[in-house]
Image (cartoon, grey):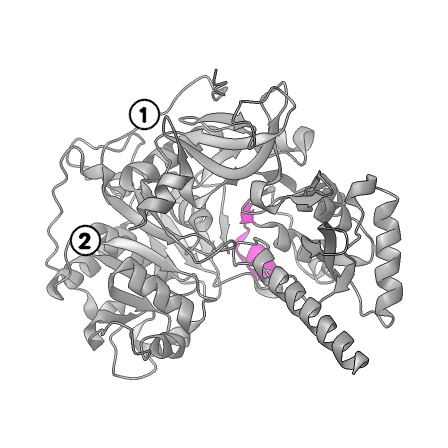
Amino acid sequence: MSKIHLPGYDTEPALPRCSVFDYLFPDPTSESSSPYPCPDARDVAYIDGLTGREITRGEVADQAKRLAAGLRSLGLKRGDVGCVYGMNSLEWVNAAMGCQAAGIVVSPANYGYTPEEVLHQIVDSTAKVIFVQPALLPTLQKALSFPHAPKFPDNRIILLCRPPDKPDGRFKCLEEVWSDRYEPLRWRRGDETATAFLCYSSGTTGRAKGVETSHHNMTSQIQALNIAYTQLRKGQDVCLGILPFGHIYGLTVVLHQPLTVGVPVVVLPRFEEISVLSAIQRFKITWALVVPPVLIVLLHSKNVSKYDLSSIRGMQSGAAPLGKDLTEAFERRFPSMKITQGYGLTETSPVTHVMTASEGQSHRGQIGRLMPTFQARLVDAETGKDVGPGEAGELWFRGPSVMKGYWKNAEATSNAFAHGGWFKTGDVAVVDEHGYYSIVDRVKELIKYKGFQVPPAELEALLLTHPKIADAAVIGIHSHEQATELPRAYVVPLTPVSEHTEFADEVMRWVAEKVSNHKRLRGGVCLIKAVPKSPSGKILRKDLRAMAKKEQEDAVKSTRQARL
């Protein structure tokens, strides 16, 4: 019999049936579908963290409507897809909100994509219009120059910049597309199940897939967050906006959720140490949404003492595992900052587990409790049976924020769901007697050493506590001689290392003293300049596997040549 886990909250949120745009900007003259009081239109909504330029809530809505009208004049219609390709900016906000006002599906593209990856998303999503940051225009143009690329007229490529910053006169920028002839869309009951966002999964295990997030998925997610999440206080809090808006984490928890409670977001293109420290001091930022690599940089930073960071009361980490040891080390250096962790996936819009800043101290290393609106199960991947308390099992979800499915990929969608509508995450978790969950690892990323399971995340968390290591990642490499996988670590030294072999041996001995026999780094320790990661902070293990494969092939070639 299935053991279904339920949220432990006193209240469940109302789940409105409306579009995302109507939810964010309800018409105050009519009965609103939004269940929260509409914040004042004069409230500052977003601030450019580099220039200080501000836009109010009312301006966000007005600009979105003007862009929506302009997009319709170009022949775009409800249900079409718009690709938004750029780093965080106020123009990115305008493009996304304008598409929503027009009923156009927003498909954000990773700003770190290669031309081939950009083209894959454009083709796969069937995008009809592309919004692009001028600095990324050469990458886009190269992508569109490939023989199999679709043809885009110049008026369907729109620059994410203001008129004075245009690089040339060929393409228009957002403001040049605006029109005042906006007519609101009519939404009927059932229309809220239409796709609102088409984010692409990170592709850590293969080619990126489009994840269909409906309007109801998103509004239900925000409703749940406003109950379970650390409360943001209008007039007191200011959020840091460095998480990529193109990733579901930043899209939901930075771009959308603060807007519903009248809290401004300081928008920065991406994480850069000095610009972030400067923004915290200048704008008195109180709350930051981050990923573990950001905490690692700040923990080892030599610049934090030069800035006043006293306004920060806490940080919420997500998108990648955050170990207890790293959390404790960070809070020792920054005693006034409370670190908490959440968990989610693109497929769940994204947050499924979260804890408040007050909970974080007593549950370090855990991801929190199950969010309102969700149901969960922990299932043994091999037997298909539910596991008991304290036992590890694959995490399954059901709820109104679980995706519609993978875009135009019925097979992948079918494989992702179990009978009864349960979405299978591929992540292994345990839950304690108080309802707090911990992620052990991914089902597909567990290293199997002679039948024993070795979780890479556990070894990575341990390696990050080594005083000479700045960052680390662990993968399994196959050993033909031993017919098994061997754990291998790729580490980034905190300072330059002259003797690589000596340092690697030191790390291997250090780990061997702290782990079970089967978890030792028998695959070796390799020194690298940086661990490959997605913009959201996820370790790109496929890149490390490719690196390991090449190393093995080179070793074989060297052996053959030596024999000749």
Residue at x-position 24% and y-position 57%: 81
> In the image, what residue type sits under mark 2?
Ala
Q: Quadrant of residue 329?
A: top right
Q: Amino acid at mark 1?
A: Ala
List x then y, in percent, for residue 465: 78, 48
Horizontal side of residue 314 vs 461, given as left or right: left
Which residue is disc 2 drawn over? 102
In percent of width and height, residue 111 lies at: 44, 65
Up the image or down, 136 lies above or below 220; here it is below
Residue 467 inside the magenta-drawn segment: no
Residue drawn at (25%, 43%) of the image: 25
Q: Quadrant of residue 530?
A: bottom right
The mark tally for this picture is 2
Residue furthest out toward the front:
564
Quarter occupied by the C terminus: bottom right
Query: Marks 2/1: CA distance?
Result: 25 Å
Mark 1, secondary structure of its residue? loop
Circle 2 packing at 10 Å, graded few (<14), some (14-19), many (20+), is many
**Which residue is located at x 39 percent, y 53 percent?**
209
- Which residue in the protein does label 1 denote? 14
Q: Residue at x 88, y 44 (%)?
A: 513
Earlier residue among tags 2 and 1: 1
Residue interval drawn in magenta: 276-290
Q: Looking at the image, which is closer to me, 302 or 119?
A: 119
